[in-house]
Image: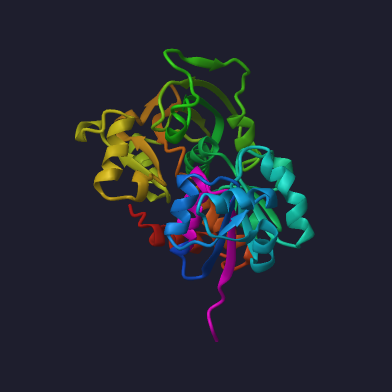
Amino acid sequence: MPKRVVKVGVNGYGVIGKRVADAVKLQDDMELVGVADIAYDYRVKVASLKGYDVYASIPEKRKEMEAAGINVKGTLEDLLKEVDIIVDCTPKGVGAKNKALYEKYGKKAIFQGGEKHEVAGVSFVAQCNYEQAIGKNFVRVVSCNTTGLCRTLNTIKREFGIKRARAVLVRRGCDPWESSRQGPLNTVVPEVKIPSHQGPDAKTVIPDLNIITLACNVPVTLSHLHFVMVEPQRLPSRDEVIEAFNKAPRIRLFRASDGFDGLQAIIEYHRDILRPRADMWEVAIWEESITIDNGEICWIMQVHNEAIVIPENIDAIRAMTELELDGWKSIEKTDKSLGIAK
């Protein structure tokens, strides 16, 4: 019997969309049918150079895209006719507006963390709640920061229980490609609403999580930095915490003593090992920062805003289309395809 292959489309070929498209191409149980966008700059031209079929997300933009030399195969509606599932990677708020179109064509859809939980009804982090996404028509992959928090906190919760968690997020000002257009400059901008949205967002994945988050934006583009403090149900030894993180998927420990003295060093490492775009799909935790003190577990971690949610999108496709009912098997398959290893 031939292996079942799910046909996937990507709407929005930006920071997340282009990475999702590349990851889909690596799966032996998925076929990338095409990508859709409204832009006609170098980014979409690269999609054509890679051999991806390009569609116009808005029909009125097709002429402009073709005038710029992009071979446009059709519109988003044409793409929807050919796929089993669409991964919406459009800017914040656009995905929610696109939902009606996906419903019109009876297509399953994945939304990103910029949309509200209510758009899909299921907010997703693979190692936390894979089973909730099985067979669903709509799923939301949570934001990069929420993904990082959920992966690490769920690991602690599973092993030791959590009474209370607190996290301080130092957020990058903007994605690197937007550096000429936005982001704070020569300042640090606090998010004065407490909790910041990441704490309540984490509770959409782990409902019984007692967490409060604080955040600020800083003038860097490399990634986010989190300071996390957890009061566990059972206080473990430091070695037990290290063992728990080492066993968990998509979490990796780095040592400052090995030269990883800041965000830039860990990103440079991923350049050196020839990761595509220097992407870090894992959460990076500084091993020296793992501390047991005054009844709390503390650690410092790095979240690569451009890349961390890519494995989650692939696992969400498998869960929703029921390619794989076992979340841990999907995680293993996705990680192997991307080259994630402990």
| Relative depth, front residue between 30 and 302 | 30
Q: Over which residues does the magenta segment extend?
A: 1-24
Q: Quadrant of residue 304?
A: top left
Query: Residue at left 31%, top 35%?
Result: 287
Image spot of residue 76 (x, y percent): 66, 57
Query: Residue at left 53%, top 62%?
Result: 53
| Relative depth, front residue between 211 and 139 | 139
Q: Quadrant of residue 289?
A: top left
Query: In the image, is residue 174 part of the stretch drawn in magenta?
Result: no
Query: Residue at left 35%, top 50%?
Result: 276
Query: Residue at left 56%, top 76%?
Result: 4
Drawn side of residue 300 relative to residue 128, left or right: left
Placement of 59 over or under 330, stated as above or below: above
Farthest residue, direction front:
67
Q: How many marks?
A: 0
Name the quadrant of the N terminus. Answer: bottom right
Q: Quadrant of residue 75?
A: bottom right
Image spot of residue 125 (x, y percent): 56, 48
| Relative depth, front residue between 30 and 43 | 43
Image spot of residue 288 (x, y percent): 29, 31
Image spot of residue 103 (x, y percent): 77, 57
